[in-house]
Image: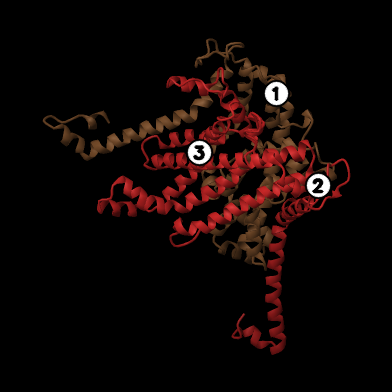
Amino acid sequence: MIRALAARPGETLTSFLSRQSVRTRLSHLTMHLLLLAITATALLPMVYMVSTSLKPEGTEYEFPIRWIPERIVWENYPKAFTSVRTLVFLKNTLLITALSLVGGLLSASLAAYGFARLRFPGRSVLFILMLSTLMLPYFVTMIPLFILFRTLGWINTLYPLIVPAFFGGSPLYIFLLRQFFLTLPTELDDAAKIDGAGFFRTWWSVLVPLTKPALATVAILSLVHHWNEFVGPLIFLNTENNFTLALGIRLFRDQYTTFLNYTMAYSTMMTVPILTVFFLFQKYFIRGISMTGLTGR
Amino acid sequence: MTTGDPIVQALPGRWAQRTGLGLRLSLRRREALAGYLAILPWFLGFLFFAIGPIAASFGLMFVSWEVITPPTWSGLGNFERLLGDSLALISLQNTLFYTVFAVPLNLLAALFAASLLNVGVRGTNVYRAIIYLPSQMPLVASSILWFYIFSPTYGLANGVLGWFGVAPQRWLWDVNLVKASLVIMAVWAFGGAMIIFLAGLQGIPTALYEAAEIDGANTFSRFRLITLPMLSPTIFFNLIVGIIGSFQVFTSVFLMTAGGPGSSSLMLVLYIYRNAFQHFKMGYASVLAWLLFCIVLILTLVQFALSRRWVYYEGETR
């Protein structure tokens, strides 16, 4: 880069600047500067969070902000972790996340198979109906659902957060998997049929193994959604032993509102697993988003 | 099965026809049955968790129900209440204000960053991952983080203002700044829309740009004449999804301002939540929820109608 930017002997400034390679380099330099500025803006709040989470008690309110703590206090993390019943919240969150993942994958894949590979009257209408439910604001259904779950005695249990996942997951998952099923050659189904496999056997043994990339994408979407979900738990859960992490962090904030370092440690702890999953499975994240437009919020 | 089939010809005519037809039908029936069975779990969910609740919510609009006592018919009472409810109006105005600023700013930032990333300078993958991060942070965690960032006495927001010599602000505690603060936080998480734009940009054939370059088009006119029209379906999609989402803003407001100071950041969904789950006015909350639904529906339909004028679909429709 430096060498390309060096002016050749005897070169005038005009000819130097108009050289194609120099123009490209300079425009790339501008790009890097702009991208660095955006990256810094994206990161700054997170750096602030991590930096504050490591500060000794009493120094977290210093202003102007001291970016590198005078002493790095890792103990803030175990302290924050144990000061509320984090293990219980974690267990509930994992239970919800894992079970809805399984239920969502199974039922969405099955429905997607039906919509993509099997012909039946009313298929297109049902498919459009399914997609149109995406537009429903969740609070329109939330009130009757609350009443329904209350009648079933499910309020303050994990059922309302798990059971619905077994009934299709989300229309987006079905849509994404259906699109993927459509790309597989129909000869696969025919070959399976000749071998004597029924429709469900064809789905399970022939097609499901081939849709692994799409299933991984859906798995990531579902995982992130259930890990982050706040409104559902807020409405359906009301005692601490049923709380999820999302509710736990709020509880923590309300109880330790003056302990900024612990609160930031807690926020960091809730964020890190998701970001780890993101970095490990970036490809699937990006695909899920570009295929469905679901941004994870 | 054709009539030329030797087996069919060997069988007595009518009988063969009937079984042949019967066989075909039963195969098709079996496929249809399997199809219905495959979508059955989803369909049950659709009935119990979507259509059923919508119907129930419609009915709830006409009753007065505080959960602990049995519901009583109230006719149009809930609607009359809505007409005289200044808080509902305020929450609607606040939500509109929030949407009008948060959605376009978010999309502009996303489009800008996506265009930069699409050039493909070295390190693009790293830039993309980091710029995308904020949108993946759990909303609860980022709301709490931004709550402290906006602290009037020690927060990062005032720290940044200080670098530019601007006086500290009261952000979430300032009636005039609170909505802007929420918008800033929403724009910060533009990564999701950016990824969608990036996918859209990568779908534009490079031949178009090469041809334009030969014709002497500069960067700006290439953007205006090729990128914008080719990207318009993606912009349209992001706009629709953005507005639907923005009208339902809840978690950040609930955790950061609780609608305050006063009612200056009271949003429609927060108001619905309060009526339904704090005051247990299920009937009135349903009216508000349907108001939200109708607004979102109308806005979406209007956008679809307007889209014919500016969204360009090449070949197949998306």
Tell me the amino acid under the disc marked 1.
Answer: Asp
Instruction: Say which mark, if any, is on residue A148.
Output: 2
Q: Residue B132's spot in the image, x, y percent?
A: 50, 36
In the rendered image, which quarter is residue A158 located in? Answer: top right
Q: Residue A269's spot in the image, x, y percent?
A: 62, 26
x 59%, y 15%: residue: A74
x 69%, y 34%: residue: A94
Task: Tell me the colour chain A is drawn in.
Answer: brown
Assign the N terminus of chain A to one quadrant of the image. Answer: top left
| 10 Å crowding of disc 1: few (<14), some (14-19), many (20+) | few
Please give the chain letter of the residue carrying mark 2: A
The residue carrying mark 1 is A254
Residue furthest to the right in view is B70
Please give the chain letter of the residue carrying mark 1: A
Residue furthest to the front in view is B84
Instruction: Say which mark, if any, is on residue B43.
Output: none
The answer to whether marks 3 and 1 mark residues whose Cβ atoms lie closer than 8 Å is no
Q: Give the CA distance from mark 1 to mark 2.
A: 30 Å
Helix, strand or loop at label 2? It is helix
Q: Nearer the viewer, residue A118 or A56?
A: A56
- Residue B224 lies, with reference to residue A275, above or below; the image says below
Q: Give the CA distance from mark 2 to mark 3.
A: 36 Å
The residue carrying mark 3 is B191
Residue B48 placement, left or right of B121: right
The answer to whether marks 2 and 3 mark residues whose Cβ atoms lie closer than 8 Å is no
Tell me the amino acid under the disc marked 2.
Answer: Leu
Q: Nearer the viewer, residue B293 or A98?
A: B293
Chain in red (letter):
B
Helix, strand or loop at label 3? It is helix
x 70%, y 45%: residue: A139
